[in-house]
Amino acid sequence: MLVYQAGAPAPALIEFMTRLPDEAGLTNGTSPGGGYPDDGPVLANVPGTLAGMRLAWERYGSGRIAWADLVGPAMRAAENGFPVSDGLATTLQVEREHFLKYPGSRALFFPHGEPLKPGETLRNPDLARTLKAIADSGPGIFYHGGIARQVVQDLRGQGNAMRLTDLARYYAAEREPVSGTYRGYSIFSSAPPSAGGATLVAQLNLLEQVPDPEPYPENPAALHAMIEAWKLVPSARDRIADPGLWPVRTEAFVSKDSARARWRCFRPDRALSTRDLQGDMPRCAEAGAGPGAPPGEACVPGVGAHCHQSGTTAFVVADAAGNVVAVTQTLGTWGGSFYVTPGLGFVYNDKLGSYGDDPAAYGARLPNARHGSTLAPTIVLSGSGSNHRAVLGTGAAGNAWITSAVYAIVTGVIDQQLDPQHAVELPRFLLSGRRAGAGTGDGYPVQVESSLAPEVVQQLTLMGDELQPISLPGELRMGYAAAVLVGRGRVTAAADPRRSGTAGAIGCGKNEAEGCQLDSYPR
């Protein structure tokens, strides 16, 4: 969570990533034989969202709203129910075999043996009772009270390593955002253990070497530059992980000198290959040299074993005074672990499987380690001194597609002066690592949504990129984003049409007796 208070020199950052239970590390033998399962209670890490929200309320809240009043709307939504969205209905249908395995999930989402359909009402009285306890007693009841005991009794009885002490020792941390500049604007984004902010700042540092980029959906040279800038981002391997356990290093990402050196590899007439970019600092980045670890994998339905779509939530809130909050939180997949403890009403995360198995490497499955990610809630500031103010807040969901979405939105607003809705709707592209079935040779496969001009697709193919179309009519894709553009006394909101996005405004009349009215519209 990034929190910008009007007039501050920079946003604050609250990090509430999940933590590995103490007994779930590499050396204690608790992992099941043959690796972890595809779903289920064993995958749950210690949750952090509640601790993060409480810290935000205590440290940055106005002081005019009681904790119980803050929790109240969620509690009432769970009790009274809400209409099932197209996105949730799709999740239940696509992942039905995983939800149906567990009584708590089955009772909640398949009340009549079939998944809830769009427009049907989802009521969750168990969650309402859980939230009522949290509203009345605070988060302590979740981390070392009655709810904690229910969580541990259930999860531990089903093979999870979580203990009461794991929940009791959890804390949300305040960290320095990763920051940089881009064409005169100040960029602030997520910090380790997430690599998303560092990747974004590095992408922008590299793209800044292009003086006046054109709109990339219609211009082959512009999209080529954006893709090549992404290829030239330093690897996060052995640089970014939980800063409480590893010495994180972001210098290569935020350094303008590093970006200028790496940009020596750029060729306007051809795509860089994996062979060109071997090594931590490619040979082509050395002065006078010419071109001589692919990025992370994306989940591609239909390729290899079943892969779950990413279940991240991103939202941004701003007010006319210039305060902005950008939040990205995650269960891991659309359904997290797909497991609900009977009586509690919430789905657990699946982040136990998000760690490496090499104890000497960054991001290994060590006791209490926070999981890594690509989360990238971002706030952009303009000006300095008395003119220092927020102009953009954004974030996205979708694992590797988070990087794609935030990169497109920030550059769309700054370089093309797009309004936030048009920036959110820009066609996405994802630089993908090589895997079986992804093509031949040593090129980088690039997954692309539709809406690119045919000339752009043709030219990039001729340059050597392996473009893989991913969007079909009616298909719901990844990278669901939110954005707000902040003016002086005015906020313009945008939400992603790719999957149940909604933007809304709350305004108060001049007479307080008129109250406040919520105007929302589906986009």
Image (cartoon, helix red, strand yellow):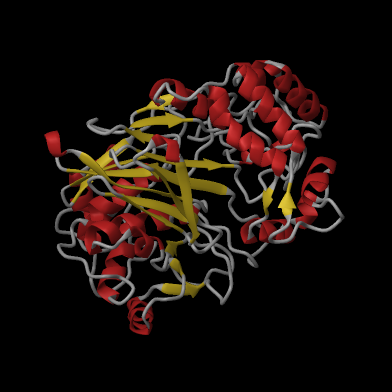
Quarter holding the N terminus is: top left
Q: Residue 9, image x and y in percent?
A: 22, 31
- Is residue 159 rendered to the left or right of residue 6? right
Q: Residue 198, image x and y in percent?
A: 35, 43
- Is residue 141 rendered to the left or right of residue 425? right
Residue under the point 75% across and 19% down: 149
- Is residue 257 rendered to the left or right of residue 83? left
Depicted 163 relative to depicted 205: above or below: above
Q: Residue 234, image x and y in percent?
A: 34, 48
Q: Nearer the viewer, residue 34 or 429?
A: 429
- Is residue 517 rendered to the left or right of residue 206? right
Number of disc labels: 0
Residue under the point 47% across and 25% down: 65
Residue under the point 14% across and 58% down: 288
Depicted 489 relative to depicted 302: above or below: above
User: Splitting the image into 4 quarters, where does residue 215 fall?
Assistant: bottom left
Q: Nearer the viewer, residue 509 or 20?
A: 509
Q: Residue 277, image x and y in percent?
A: 34, 58
**Residue 134 shows in the view:** yes
Residue under the point 32% across and 37% down: 323
User: Splitting the image into 4 quarters, where does residue 425 fall?
Assistant: bottom left
Q: Nearer the viewer, residue 376 or 120?
A: 120
Q: Nearer the viewer, residue 508 or 120?
A: 508
User: Splitting the image into 4 quarters, where does residue 150 fall?
Assistant: top right
**Residue 374 shows in the view:** no
